[in-house]
Image: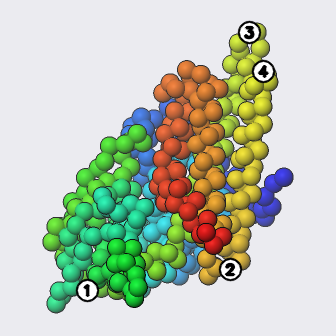
Amino acid sequence: MSVEFTSEQKDFAAAIADFCKRETGTREVRDKLTNHGEHNHNQDVYEKMAKLGWLGITVPEEYGGSDASLVDMCILLEEAAKGMAPIGGIGPTLITGGAYAKFGTEAQKDVVLRGIVAGRSQAISMSEPEAGSDVGNLSTRAEKTADGWVVNGQKTWCSNAHFADNILLVARTGQPVKRSGGNSSTEGKHEGLTMFHVPAGTAGLKINGIGTMGGKEVNDLYFTDCVLPEDAVVGEVGNGWRQLMTGLNFERLILAAMMLGTAQRAFNDTLEFITQRKQFGRPVGTFQVLRHRIADLATEIECCKLLVYSVAKEADADPNKMLAREASMAKLKVTETAKKVALEGMQMMGGYGYATEFDMEKHVRSTLVSSIYGGTNEIQRDIIGKTYGL
C-alpha cells in the first residue's frame, strides 16, 4: 500500500529529505542549531527553506507564494518533521497565514503573506488561563475608541510569539448572546469575538516565556492598554468565531502531517537501533516480542499516512468543504499513534531510549504534547462523536 503521488511530488519529497540530511542530518549539528534542544526554531535554516520557495507553499501567487495543494503542504511538513529540521515556526505560521489569506485586508496580506514567503514567522493567540479547550470563554477585551481599539487581558500557550513578526489575536469585542430558551453560560458565548492584527513590539504587549519539556516554545501574552489602529481588525468585527471555525480543519491537518513525519522518524530510529543492538548473541530486533511490536507500529503508521493524505486530497477537491469529522480523525489518530511509536521506541531501546545521547527522548517529548495542542484529543473525540448525531 502507498499513497499515490505525482512524479513532481515525489521529487519534492526527495528534495526536502536531501535538504534535511545536508543541513540538519546529525545530532551534533541539530544540537548546535537548537542550543541542545532549548530552541525548536533556527532562523537560518528557516530562511534557507524560504529561498527554495517552500515556505510560501500555501500562499497565493499574487503574494509571492506557489499556491500549491494541501497534499504538497503535507509532504513538506511530513518530510521536514521526519528530517528533524528545527523549524518550529512553520506550523503556527501556516495556520495563521491561512486566516490572513481568507479574511485579511490587502494591506495585512501584503505584510503577513509576503513575510511568510520571505521566511518570517507568525503566531495565533486564542487560549487564556480560563479558556483553553473552551475557547468561547475567553475574556481578553478589545474596547472600541474613536481612533481604534484598546486591548486588555492575558493570553497563554501562544506558540512562537517570542520570535513571530505578527500575532493574530482573538479577543472579545461584544458580550455573549443569550438566545431564547438558552443558558447564557453555554449559549451564544461564541458571539462577539474578533480577530486582530498585532505586530510584534506593539506598545502595551508583554511576552513571557513558559518553561516546558520542549524548551522555549510557548508564551504568556499580557495586554495592558494596548492600542491598535482601527484597521487592525482581521475580517469582520464580532465574526471571529466563525472565521476560526473555517480554519480549524486546516490546522488539524497541519498538525497531523507534522506528527506523521515524527512518527516515521521515531520508527526509523527504533528499527535502526534494534537491528544493530545485540543481546544474548543476536540483534534484539530478531526476538519475536520486538519483531511483532515493529509490525504493529509499521501498520499503524501506514494507516495514518493513508488517512492524512486522503483528507488532504478531499480538501483539495473542495476547498470550501468543512471536514470536521475527517480532520479531527486525522489529528486524533496520528498524534495518538506518534505518541505510541515514541514510547514503544523508548521501551525497545531500553536505557538508551531515555538517554539524551539519542533522539528518542526528544521524540517522546514532542509527541506527548501533540495530543494536547491544536484542540486536545478529548475534544477531537467529542467533535467526531457529534458528527454522528451524539
Residue at which label 2 appears: 318
For the residues labelled 4 and 3, say whether their Cβ atoms are less than 8 Å apart. Answer: no
**Is residue 348 shown left or right of residue 139?**
right
> Could you give the CA–CA distance between mark 2 and mark 3, rounded to whole angstroms?
56 Å
Between 170 and 9, the residue placed more toward the observer is: 170
Between 12 and 73, the residue placed more toward the observer is: 73
> Could you give the CA–CA distance between mark 2 and mark 4, rounded to whole angstroms?
47 Å
Q: Position of residue 141 (x, y in %)?
A: 24, 74
Q: Amino acid at mark 1?
A: Glu
Q: Amino acid at mark 3?
A: Phe
Residue at which label 3 appears: 280
- Determine the image quadrant of residue 112: bottom left
Q: Which mark is residue 287?
A: 4
Whichever of callouts 3 and 1 sits on the residue coming sooner in the sequence is: 1
Q: Which mark is residue 230?
A: 1
Q: Name the residue at the front extreme.
A: 181
Q: Name the residue at the top extreme.
A: 281
**Is residue 300 shown left or right of residue 360?**
right
Q: Nearer the viewer, mark 4 or mark 1?
A: 4
Residue at 34 percent across and 84 percent down: it is: 177
**Dot 4, how many residues are within 10 Å of its Cα: few (below 14), some (14-19), or many (20+)?**
few
Q: Is residue 117 above or below residue 355?
A: below
Residue at 52 percent across and 77 percent down: it is: 246
Q: Amino acid at mark 4?
A: Phe
For residue 117, say whether it is visible: no
Whichever of callouts 4 and 3 sits on the residue coming sooner in the sequence is: 3
